[in-house]
Image (cartoon, grey):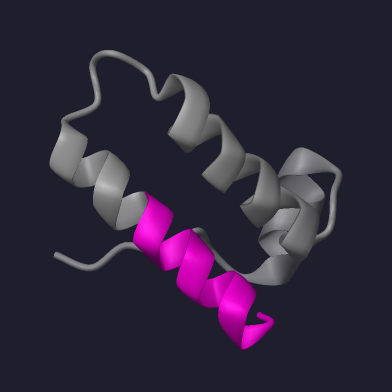
């Protein structure tokens, strides 16, 4: 199953920040304090998607 963080407009509407700021905060949060109930493989995949979207500039 593939997941993404959603379209940039939805991120802005839901979180009140632009896409890049959201992805940077997400990556930083997952590296420092990923929630305990999340499986490590899910944290890794989520971080990978966020870093890839930052790299692509989306």
Confirm whether residue 4 shows in the render: no
Kindly give the residue lying farthest to the bottom in the view shown. Answer: 56
Image-based side of 45 in relation to 53, left or right: left
33 lies above or below 27: above
Relative image position of residue 4 (x, y in whole percent): 41, 64
Question: Can see residue 26?
Answer: yes
Q: Is residue 41 left or right of residue 32?
A: left
Residue 57, compared with residue 43, is above or below; it is below
| Chain part drawn in magenta | 47-58
In the rendered structure, the answer to whether residue 33 lies left or right of residue 17 reads left
Tell me, yes or no, whether the highlighted magenta stretch contains residue 35.
no
- Looking at the picture, does residue 16 appear above or below residue 3? above
Residue located 55% across and 74% down the image:
53
Q: Residue furthest top?
A: 36
Quadrant of the image containing the N terminus: bottom left
* Above or below, 38 relative to 10: above
Towards the viewer: 7 or 35: 35
Image spot of residue 2 (x, y percent): 23, 68
Q: Is residue 54 magenta?
A: yes
In which quadrant of the rendered view does residue 11 lie? bottom right
Look at 67% across and 42% down and name the residue there: 25
Q: How many numbered discs, if any?
A: 0
* Left or right of 2 in this view: 10: right
Residue drawn at x 63%, y 55% as measured from the top left:
23
Q: Main secondary structure of the magenta part?
A: helix
The quarter of the rendered structure image containing the C terminus is: bottom right
In the rendered image, residue 33, in percent from the top left (x then y), is placed at 46, 20
| Residue ID at (50%, 58%) | 5
């Amino acid at each position: 199953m593939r997941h993404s963080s959603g379209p940039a407009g939805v991120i802005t509407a839901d979180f009140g920040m632009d896409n890049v700021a959201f992805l940077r905060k997400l990556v930083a949060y997952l590296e420092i304090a990923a929630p305990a109930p999340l499986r490590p493989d899910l944290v890794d995949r989520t971080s990978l998607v966020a870093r890839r979207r930052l790299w692509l500039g989306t």
